[in-house]
Image (spheres, rainbow, N blue to C red):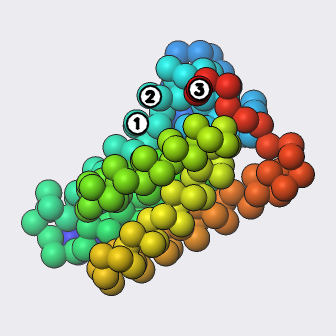
Amino acid sequence: MIYGIIIILAYLLGSIPSGLIVGKLFYGMDIREHGSGNLGGTNTFRTLGVKAGMIVTIADILKGTLAASLPLFFGSDMHHLLAGIFAVIGHMYPLFAGFRGGKAVATSGGVLLAYVPFMFLILLGVFFLSLYITKYVSLSSILAAAASIIYALVLGDIPLIIVVSILGFFVIYRHRANIKRIRDKTEPKIKWLG
């Protein structure tokens, strides 16, 4: 019973469409109708600017962190990472936004922040280093996902290896159009860093 409640709450937390809320409340804009049409932080940066992008990204990270912390709040023995996966699914396929969500990068990071904070910091470093060098958010997200799998393998934490492999798959799968655009040299580069 408690497992079911945690799973539902984690999914609902993940379903909170931060990008849609910030866009409509403060800018009178549905970001799904602009840029890539995506509800995540990257499209928010692209369509609404740095301030809105930062707010949405932080909110999406915290959704994952809070969802992965639910077993602790309920005194349950459910693994934190399992709860976190349902938040990521909610972010990608949100109940509150017609099941059209983001690409799971920030929310996945938030799940890892709850379980292995140092790993989160390492991945943040990988992401921003790649972003500074390449100016591609999508490529930086994919590299951070790959780094998470390598880090988990080094730690030898079996549940972590399984979950980051699943999350890494989600991230790469959701970026398949970006990968094609990078190959074709049509992927937009950021202009606000370095």
How far apart are the alpha carbons under marks 2 and 3? 20 Å
Disc 2 marks which residue? Answer: 55
Q: Determine if residue 12 is in view.
A: no
> Crowding at label 3, few (<14), some or many (≥20) Cα neighbours within 10 Å?
few
How far apart are the alpha carbons under marks 3 and 1? 21 Å
Between label 2 and label 3, give the one nearer the viewer.
Answer: 3
Q: Which residue is depicted at the point 49% across and 75% down?
A: 165
**Residue 10: x %, y % from top left:** 35, 58
**At numbered mark 1, what does the secondary structure look like: helix, strand or loop?**
helix
Q: Farthest residue in the left direction? A: 75
Q: Which residue is depicted at the point 39% across and 79% down?
A: 153
**Residue 100: x %, y % from top left:** 64, 50
Disc 1 marks which residue? Answer: 58
The image quarter in which residue 192 lies: top right
Give, as a three-letter code, the residue at label 1: Ile
Instruction: Verify CB contact (< 8 Å) between mark 1 and mark 2.
Output: yes
**At numbered mark 3, what does the secondary structure look like: helix, strand or loop?**
loop
Q: Which residue is depicted at the point 42% across and 47% down?
A: 124
Residue closest to the eye, 128 or 49: 128
Q: Which numbered disc flags the more N-terminal residue, 2 or 3?
A: 2
**Residue 2 position (above or below residue 115):** below
**At numbered mark 2, what does the secondary structure look like: helix, strand or loop?**
helix
Give, as a three-letter code, the residue at label 2: Ile
